[in-house]
Image: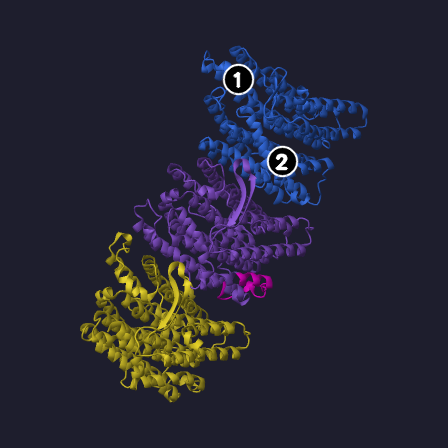
Amino acid sequence: MFPILSVIVFTPLVAGLLLFLIPGERHSEIRATALAAAAFTLLLSLLVYFGYDQGAAGYQFTEKYDWLPALGVSYYVGVDGINAPLVLLTGLVMFTGVLISWGIDDRPREFFAFLFILATGVLGVFVALDLFMLFFFYEIAVFPMYLLIAIWGWKQTREYAAMKLTLYLFIGSVIALVGALGMYFTSGLGTFDMIALEAADFPLEFQSWAFPVVFLGFAVLGGIFPFHNWSPDGHVAAPTAVSMFHAGVLMKLGAFAALRVGMMLLPEGAQMWMPVIIVFAMINVVYGAFIAMVQTDFKYVIGYSSVSHMGLVMLGLATLSRNGFIGAGVQMFSHGVMTALFFAAVGMVYDRAHTRDINKLGGMVRYMPLVAVAFIIGGLVSMGMPGLSGFVAEFPIFMGLWTASTSPINTNWPYAGWVAPLMAVLAALSIVITASYILRVIRKVFFGPIPAEFEGHIGPITALDKIALVVLAAVLVLLGVFPRLMVPLVETGVDNVIRLFGGA
Amino acid sequence: MTMILALLPEILLVVLTGFVLVFDLVWRDPAAKRNLGWLTAGGAFLILAVSWLAARPGTAPLEVWGGMLRHDWLAFTFKSIGLVGLGVTALLSMDAPGLGKKGEYYLLLLTSTIGICLMGASADMIMLFLAIETTSIPLYVLAGFMKTDDRSTEAGFKYLLFGAMTSSVMAYGFSLLFGFTGTTDLYELAQGLASGELTEVGIVFSAMLVLVGFAFKISMVPFHFWAPDVYEGAPTPVAGFLSTASKAAGFAVLIRFALAAFPAEPGLGGLDPIITILLAGACVATMTLGNTIALAQNNIKRLLAYSSIAHAGYVLLGVVAADVFGIASAVFYLLAYLLTNLAAFGVVMIVGRAVGSDEISAYAGLSRRSSGLALVMLVAFLSLAGVPPLAGFIGKIWVFAAVVNQGMYVLAFIGVLNAIIGVYYYLIVLKFVYLYRSDDEDKPIRITRPDALALGLLTFGIILVGTIFAPWWGIADAAAAAIFG
Amino acid sequence: MDFIHDNILTLVLFSPAAVALVLLFLPAEEKGLLRWTAFTGSLVPLALTLVLWFGFDASAEGFQFEIQALWYDAIGSSYHLGVDGISLAMVLLTTLLVPLAILASYSIDDKIKAYMILFLLLETGMLGVFLSLDLLIFFVFYEIGLVPMYFLINLWGSEKGERKLWGGMTVPARTYASFKFMVYTMGASLGLLLAIQMIGAVTGTFDLIELYEVWQTSDASLEVFGLGAATVRSIAFWAFVVAFALKVPVWPFHTWLPDAHTEAPTAGSMILAGVLLKLGAYGFIRLVIPLYPAESQTFAYALAFLATMAIVFGAFAAYGQRDFKRLVAYSSVNHMGFVVLGIAAAALAQGTEHATIAMNGAVLQMFNHGLSAAGMFFLVGVIYDRTHTRDLEAYGGLFALVPVYGGILIFTSMASLGLPGLNGFVSEFLVVRGAWPVLTGFTALSMLGLLFTGAYILKGIKSTLHGPLNTHWVGHLTEINKRELFVIAPLMVLMLWLGIWPAWLLSVINGAVSALFG
């Protein structure tokens, strides 16, 4: 059988290495190679996404090779309903990211190479079914970020932001690592195979401390309150494509790993800690939105909105209910595409206006109508406007909150009956707050009078930019109108999670 | 015959030493003497290859010279580490001013390597002492090799004083142990100590005295003070050798001595609880102190010195775990660390030679002056920081796993937090390399052929160990198993 | 033909969106082409609605032309459409008003492509609300309609005027109005959203037909917040009520409306008053009363109180305006009050003849107000286009200058006033007739309000058409043109027709109303 997942994972890496064979000053060849690799990855990820057999469910396209058999480490990959959309998401973001990075002139070879190494890391985590492998790729995904931000980022804050981001993520991951090693030894199975570990049935006493360690360690990358601080700073300092990757894919990595390693392997710990997590997640949602409301830097607005929306993912996971999981699964994809679109649009505005202060911008719709439309679609998604993907994702999350108390897998929680619905009511506030800040940004940046200094200076966006925007916006609309394109797939994955929690 | 097999690397090294001596006399021209480096390096790798082909140990240890030396996987692994260290150091030294064209430099290096090989194999206190001195004395000289350079002289002298003092303390410990038990054989010590006639205080006291000697070699806190000054003053290739091969040999004797002489229960493996606590404390102090002080350094060699202290702490994690897994992880770590740190010192040497400074600020714009050198630096430093897919990452994972396995979660958490501090200062250096600009960007840095070969090999090795780690783990595991029989 | 018949609701619903899609690919500079494509395109849903109308069996019970397809089955929601008499009337109103509104927007010149696309998307949004038989789909369309409306006001609203915000910042008035419209509506629908989520979560379905059955009896699983099922249901009831009351709007949730109307472009106001406000009333009829029969009976007096307040205060406020458009806007508050009064009466008197009569009146009033409010806003727009002012005191004696326009204005105003023989009279009479026996006091009060309706309408006519001629306008003011006549004529015909012979519409409505409350 064709090892499609391995090819997906290693295509970016191989392409990144191939780039080094091209002389650094031949920019157009470098870009073409990068685009070809990205398109190929996207194509394969589409094949995996649509080739997944929902009837059969379970892990598919699996490949397993011994890596360190003495310790039970293997190279083991496969997709299920939860990570298949994320693989597709990575393909999408990578493809569009290359398109909108066409204009990078400072060492593009190194830029694309690091970006692709990052992509390999991300894809490796998403498809990993081996705990060791997951960490291996997780760390690979974190570090190129440092260089990408520090070298190609916004001059004023890039060093600070890059270092902050790296340290935060590294702290999170190594702490999770200790928990994961604890799992390896406590299980007594002598394997890192996560499917085997799912059946390990860890003692409650172990789960009770290992769960928060593992979950929070990963959730740092998911931007969970109060460890979210690195994220907006990183977004702002990063170059456009990297912001897209960062918010679009990397933050999902945290949420995904928190689910895959934290919740799926330590279900009883999850049941014990969820009352705490749910409160943190709610604060994430509301607090992120509030902070976004008072920002004047275009990119900080989006950065904090990401914090808020990732909070919804955590909130969905924290409901420990079928609907909540489904919503979280879809939200990961939806937010990824949405935020990639946002950052692409912000980048295009910034590249032309050279300012991100929303009070100084204005009237951009005249010069770049498509960017305005794309941004508005993204904005509507982030408000959870029905008919777009954000609604499809958020609605089940809230439904999950309402039923958290009756969810069959949600035990050990005496006050679920009123705490979870209360969280729903509080988190719903964020919808109005989001609407207000998104509308404010749209109005100030894209409409209204054009400041005199921009008259005649702002050029149109390129055809490649347009392709990127249209692709991303189309995905958001399609998913919103036809939830069936993704939801049944996610459901198959969620059923597996529910099974691990001892539900039917 | 068994004796020849068991001592094959040492014997061949002596032969190689002879060749170097002869050719040093034959080649009068300084330019030709540079070829002694090729000879030494080639010889070292040849010996490595021959030993692996002809003299691999079996599962049962082979005792020679009445049990004074043991030919087992532990010894063999550390001999291999020593040989790799020798080969790479010789290559890197060839174009180092004041070193590469001097026959006596290579001779001292070779002698020291013979000592290192013997250290790994010693199973007897007397042999051990001799081996350690064989290793150390040439190194004292090497550290002070640049006679005209005050800092080098100071480094050599400081190293000598420190080494002599700790050696004598260690020798005192040896004599006490001999007095207690009447034997010098490490493997019989445990029996003697467990006979019940001795107070625990006496045993621990003498153990501590012995450990001082080893602590010096591995630059364990609080016997680390020499390291930054010596690394800074000594010629850079020598510093690289000190921090890798010589340190690894120190760990070899520490592992063998501690586990053979002070088991939790004789014959059952493990480590005496009091010694464990002592080592664990030293381990925490070593990691934390090394990392925190490294944060404040402006000189890259001092930074690497403190980082090297910190890394000794990580290796100690594996030793503290004191089971097969723990020792294997420590050995694996040393293997990874050997390649990584040699590469780091290699780059430092080349850059230092080109820009005439070891300040971190001198690294500004390096990626534009030599993208290849910058890439090696990136690989080496990220490996030190513990980033996949590089050797350092795998090493770190397994030493942390080793303490987790023993339920010492606190140690694991301290370890990982230390690793984060490490990330910070390694990245600071890389920031200079990749981010900052300098006025000399248009002056490319020349890399000579032996340097390129050495760095290429090391980089390849770092990535290889970081991705296909099963065979290397196999070696480390065999070495660990050899201790526990 | 079978295909059209089987999928007629889907076709009606999405044909405006399809036209919008076509517009997307037309060049932005071809303004004439864009306008005529939009107009002729908007006739398609009208034609389909007529097909629907004549295929509709008024005597049959229940929903007709039902369509059900998978949509979001993970959470139990499906694409379920269907019409009964009430929704059919509303669909007809919508598809009728949209072409007229598009025709009325020919005077718009800026970004016409985007304007037309948004307008057609708005139509799909509104139709979706009237057609859906799935709670979630209902909400989807209910919210979707906000977006085009926001942009219509924000981008094509009146360019004059500023508003001072707290903090001393000044923003253009249309920005303020559109923002207020959007955030008010979204804020109010938060409760609705949460309640819908809860309903879905508790019952596992969003299908309205099923929910009518199960929601009232789903006590066991309804103990959220540790409160009893009855309390929870009451809270959910109020969440629904607030959302729809704001949309209607009922006093005291009406403050967004005058702002939005004043700033919206003419066609936007037409649709806003003509159709969007009906969404709120329709929500009461389709969701609140059937889902919460008991609660709505319990709280009917409260609702009636709000309705009466809307009638009285709406009239007073309208009388106090100097801005012609604001006057008309407050008249909407006043008129929609009657709709809510009818609904309150029907809720209170469920099962009796009074309920049927009041509800018939309410639905008819919705239709009628749609016609007359659209007409009034259009006429205000006509005069504004020529004078560029809406200040009533700047007009005066214009009848002499524009007699045709004057006649039309008087006719439409009379319809709005409720002059017997015109449509407004029939529906208000029915509402009052139904409400009087059960809500005597409130009805009496609202009759007082009716008196003031006369007052402000007459004030409006007087200030514009009569009195001393403001000579400023001589020579500047041109007569209403053909296109504009073409817009208003169908409305006038319908007003007259419904005033004289309302049975053709009432019979359709009555079937559904009796099925609901009979």
The question of residue B292 being in magenta is answered with no
Q: Mark 2 or mark 1: which comes first in sequence?
A: 1
Left or right, A457 with reference to C60:
right
Residue A270 appears in the picture as rendered: yes
Q: Using the image, name the chain to which the residue with label 2 belongs.
A: B
* Residue B57 position within the rendered picture, expressed as x and y whole percent measured from the top left: 62, 25
Left or right, residue C453 beside residue A166: left
Task: Pinpoint residue B475: horizontal percent, then vertical percent.
Answer: 59, 31
Seen at 81% across and 24% down, the residue is B26
Residue marked by disc 2: B359
- The quarter of the picture where residue B5 lies is top right
Instruction: Please give the label number shown on residue A444.
Output: none
- Residue drawn 42% across the image and 52% down it: A494
Label 1: few (<14), some or many (≥20) within 10 Å?
many
- Kindly indicate which chain is depicted in yellow in the rendered structure: C
Magenta span: A444-471
Tag 2: amino acid: Glu
Chain letter of mark 1 equals B
Chain A: give its colour: purple
Chain in blue? B
Across and down, in percent, residue C121 comes to 44, 71
Q: Amino acid at mark 1?
A: Leu
Above or below for B97 versus C60: above
Q: Which residue carries the number 1 mark?
A: B209
Mark 2 Cα-neighbour bin, 10 Å: few <14, some 14–19, many ≥20:
some
